[in-house]
Image (spheres, rainbow, N blue to C red):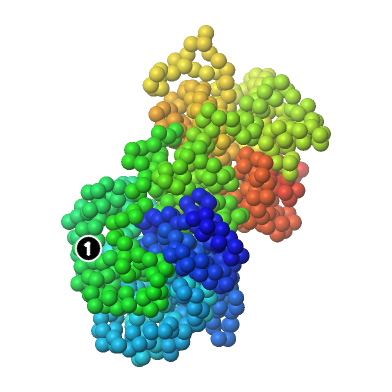
Amino acid sequence: MTDLEAELRRVVRGDVGFDITSRALTTMDASNYRRVPLGVVAPKDADDVAAVLEVCRARGVPVVARGGGTSIAGQATGTGVVLDFTRHMNRLLSLDPEARTAVAEPGLVLDRLQEAAAPHGLLFGPDPSTHSRCTLGGMIGNNACGSHSVAWGTTADSVRELSVITARGERLRLGRGWAGAPGGLRELVEGELALLRTGLPGLPRRISGYALDALLPERGADVARSFCGAEGTLGVLTEAVVRLVEAPRGRALAVLAYPDESAAAEAAAGLLPHGPLTVEGMAADLVPSAAVLPRGGAWLFVETGGGTAAEARARAEAVVRAADVVDSLVVTDPAGQRALWRIREDASGTATRMPDGTEAWPGWEDCAVPPARLGAYLREFRGLMAAHGLRGTPYGHFGDGCIHVRVDFDLMTPAGIARFRRFSEELADLVVSHGGSLSGEHGDGQARAELLPRMYGAQTVALFERAKGVWDPDDLLNPGMLVRPAPLDTNLRFSVLPREPVAVAFGYPEDGGDFSAAVRRCVGVAKCRTTSVSGPAVMCPSFRATGEEEHSTRGRARLLHEMLAGELVTDGWRSAEVRDALDLCLSCKGCRSDCPVEVDMAMYKAEFLHHHYAGRRRPAAHYTMGRLPVWLRWVARLRAGRVVNALASVRLFARVAKTLGGIDPAREIPEVAEETFSRWWGRRLAEQMRRLAVEGRRPFGDGPRATVLLWPDTFTEHLSPSVGQAAVRVLEAAGIAAVLPPTLRMGTSPDGASVRFDPLRARRGRVCCGLTYVSTGQLDRARTVMRRTLDLMAPLLETDVPVVVLEPSCAAALRTDLPELLHDDPRAARLAARVLTFAQALERLAPDWAPPSLNRPVVGQTHCHQHAVLGDAADRRLREAAGLTGELSGGCCGLAGNFGFEKGHFEVSRACAEDQLLPSVRGAANGTAVLADGYSCRTQLEQLAGVRGRHLAEVLAEGLDASESKDGRG
C-alpha cells in the first residue's frame, strides 16, 4: 500500500489520502454494506483520473467512482482506491439556455445545477430526494429518477453525451449512433438483437442490469444512454452534457387521502392521463403527527404544472374531481408545498425507524412493477413480509410503480441474516411475477445483483458479463457489482460492531441504552452535506464552513462506527482521528432535529470526550470555559467584576490570559457584570417589600396571579443580567410573578422520591444546568452539578410551578441532557418537563395579554438549540402579536458557547456566522431590531459585526417603557 500511495502522489495533482480518516469516511454509503478501501483520491481533472487508472491497473487494484455516497445498494464502496469527485471535479462548465443543455463535471451537486438553470426558466428533470447532496455523476451511475419521473423520465432520458475513460485509459465521447463505443461492443450487440428485443422488460423504471437495449438500432444505438445505470463498472465519467427542460411557471399540489397505501396505489395509475408532474405515495406511519394533511391512512401527492398558478391549480382541482378519495387538499402556496415535500424527502431517513423505535434497513428499497399492478403487488408484498415476521412501510413513486421501503431486518445475528436472504430471494420472485424490476431507482449494487438471473435469466446475465468484458476486460472498475456479484449477505456493515452494549454515560433512551445503536442511526442519506440551508434549518454548520466530509454529521458518525468496529480505528475512545473529526463539531444540536433519523452528534461528542480524556490532562479550554460557572461564581462572591474587566482591557494581561486559557487570540474576553442578576433581583425584591409594607399592601395584590421560577442561568446571571431584568419586567406586565430558585439545599431520600430538610446539614448553592460541563465532555462533573441542582429544586418539583429559562442552550440542556445523563433519577424528567422558554411561558400563562405594539422589522437568528430541541412556534406568534415582522435566519452563529472561543476555531466560527447570521444583519434596513436570544449569538454579533443583538425580552421591555412613557406624556 505504501508503494501505491507513493506512486499516486507522484502522478496525481489532486488529493491522495491513505490515512485512517480518509479511508474510514468511505467505508460505507447509504446501504447495508461496508468495505474498507486502500485509499481515496480526489482528482483535479480527467488527466488525474487517467493517471489513477494507469497506476491501479498496473497493480491490479480496483477503482470505485464515488459521488455524494448516497447509494443504497452498496455500489459506492470498494476495497481498492475510491475516486471522490465532490472535492474538485464539481463544476458546472457551461449552460446554454437556447439549446437547453448544460455541461458539468461528475461531482456537481444537483441543486447547484438547478440553481444555475432556474434564472433561465429551466431545470434538470430527474430530482431524487437527495437533490441537495447527490452528484450528477452518481445520478448517471445509478440512472437516478426522482419524484418527477412521470413527467421527465430518468437520468438516462436527460443525457446527451458523456466523456468517459475506460479502465485501460481509452478516452471516449459517448453519444448516439454508436458514438464512442469501445471496440467489440457493436459486434456484441448486433449478434444478440433477438435477445435484447425480448429479454428486457419494457418498464419506465427498469434500472436493474445494463441498458443494452438502448443500443438497438431502432433506439438510435445510444451509447451514452446505455452507460447510464452501469454503477461505475464500465468506465469512469469525467464530463456530461445533459438536457434541461422548461420549468412550469405555476405549480399546485393536490394531496389525496385514501384509507391505506393499497387503495392509494390502485388509484395512482388512473391519474396519469391527467398529465401530472408527480404522483407520489406515502402512508401514515411516515408522517409526523403535526403534519397538516387531509384525514386518511395514506396519501398521494399529485403535483400539477401550468403556464400560470391559476392554470396549475385548475389542473390540480381536476385531479381531485377525478379521484375517489376520503379527503383532499390543494396547496398553491410555495412555502406550504415545500413543507409537504420535506415530509416526503425525509422519508428515506424517517423510515429507518419503526413507530416503536425498531431499526429498519434498506436492501429492498426500490423495486418497480407496472403502475397498473402496484396495488396487487403491494398486497402480496405485505403478505410476504408478514410471513417472514417482518415490518416495513412502503412509500415512493406510485405513479411509476416504484416503491421504497425500509424493512426491520435483523442484520446482527446469523438467524436474522439468513431470514434476510430468504426474504430477498422470495421477494425477487414476487417482483418478477408482476413483470417488475428488482431495482427501480437506486441500482442493483451488492443488494440485488446476485438475484438478477431470477429477473433476466442466465442467458441475458451472461450477455451482461460479456458487455462488461468489452468495456473492462481486467475487471478493474467496481468489481462485484452487477456481474459476478458478491453475495447479498456478505460485507454487512453491522457485522463488525460489538454485540454487547458499550459502557456509556448517557442513557440513550431512544436506542435502548445502546451506544452502538445510536451510532447506527446514521444510515448515510447525508442531509448534513447540504451546502446551503433554507428557513430555520441548522445542520450542519461545520460542513458548510469547511466542505469536508470529516466535518459533517455523517462523517463523524462513520468514524464512530469504525471506532466501535476496531478494525480500522484501533485505539477506541483514545482515537485521535475521531477526536479531530469531532473537534469542529459546534454541538449545535441541529442534527437532532434536521437529520431525518435524529442523530444527536452533540451528545455523541460529549460522550466521546468523556471517555477520551478519562484520567488524562484535558485541553486548557475545558478547565476555563468548561468550568465557567465556577470562575464566574467566584468573581461574583468577591465582587471582582470591575477588576476583572479592567484587567481584561489591558492588552498584555488579556494576551496571557487567553494563552493560558486556551482562548483564540482573535477573540475578545467578554465583560463580566458588576452586579449579578440574582443580586439585582434580591435588591429589587427587598425594595418592593419595604415599599409595600409602608403602603400597607400585599406583595402580589388581591387577584390571582401566575407564578414562574425564573432560571438564573450562568450567562444571564453573570454576563447579561439585563436580559433577566427585562424578562421580569415583561412577565410582571403580563401578570406573572417571577421567583428565583432556592439556594438552600434540601436532602432527599435515596430513591429521590421524598424531600427532607436537616438544618444542621443545610448548604447553600446555585442551580446550574451543567451545559458547559456537558459540551466539554466533563460528564462526571456534570452529573454532580445536576444532582446538586435537583436537590435544590426538590421542593419546587413537588409543585406545578413552571421553570422559565431565558438562555436557549441552557433550556435545551435541561430538556434533554439532564434526563439523558441522569436517566436513573426520576427528578430529572420532572424538571425537564417543567422547562418553558420565555415566549412559551407568556403564551401558556398569560394567553390574553397583549404585548406592546412595536411595529418594526426584525432580523437575527433562531438559536440553534431552540430550533433543535425547544421549537420557536411560540416566539413567532409573540413576535407577530408585537408587530415584529420578518423571518429570523437559520444556521448557527458559530460561537456556540466555548467552541468559537477555543484556540484554532476562530476561522470556522466566523465562516459559520457568515453563512446566515451576518449577511442578514448587514442587509437590514435602519430601525430594524436585531434579535438574538442566545448569549453566544449576541457576543458573535458584537465581536464580528459591531452590532448589539438583543433578547426578545429586552425588545418587549423597551416597548413597554416607551408605551408607558407615551401614556404619561398624554
Residue 468 visible within the image:
yes
- Residue 80, located in which quarter of the rendered image? bottom left
- Residue ID at (56%, 32%): 773
Task: Give the side of residue 299 with respect to residue 970, left or right.
Answer: left
Q: Position of residue 931 (x, y in %)?
A: 65, 48
Q: Position of residue 420 (x, y in %)?
A: 25, 55
Which residue is farthest top?
760
Task: Give the side of residue 592 with respect to residue 622, left or right.
Answer: left
Residue type indicated by callout 1: Glu
Q: Secondary structure at mark 1?
A: helix
In the rendered view of the protein, which quadrant contains the C terminus?
top right
Is residue 511 depicted above or below 378 in this figure? above
- Residue ID at (42%, 58%): 79
- Residue ID at (39%, 36%): 502
Q: Position of residue 597 (x, y in %)?
A: 42, 51
Residue ID for mark 1: 425
- Residue 630, located in which quarter of the rendered image? top right
Task: Give the side of residue 525 with respect to residue 766, left or right.
Answer: left
- Residue ID at (59%, 79%): 95
In front of the other: 600 or 483: 483
Q: Position of residue 588 (x, y in %)?
A: 55, 46
Q: Residues within 10 Å of mark 1 (few under 14, many from 20)?
A: some
In front of the other: 720 or 779: 779
Q: Total number of numbered labels? A: 1
Residue 873 visible within the image:
no
Which residue is farthest left?
387
Is residue 769 depicted above or below 517 in this figure? above
In front of the other: 198 or 396: 198
Is residue 430 depicted above or below 186 in this figure? above
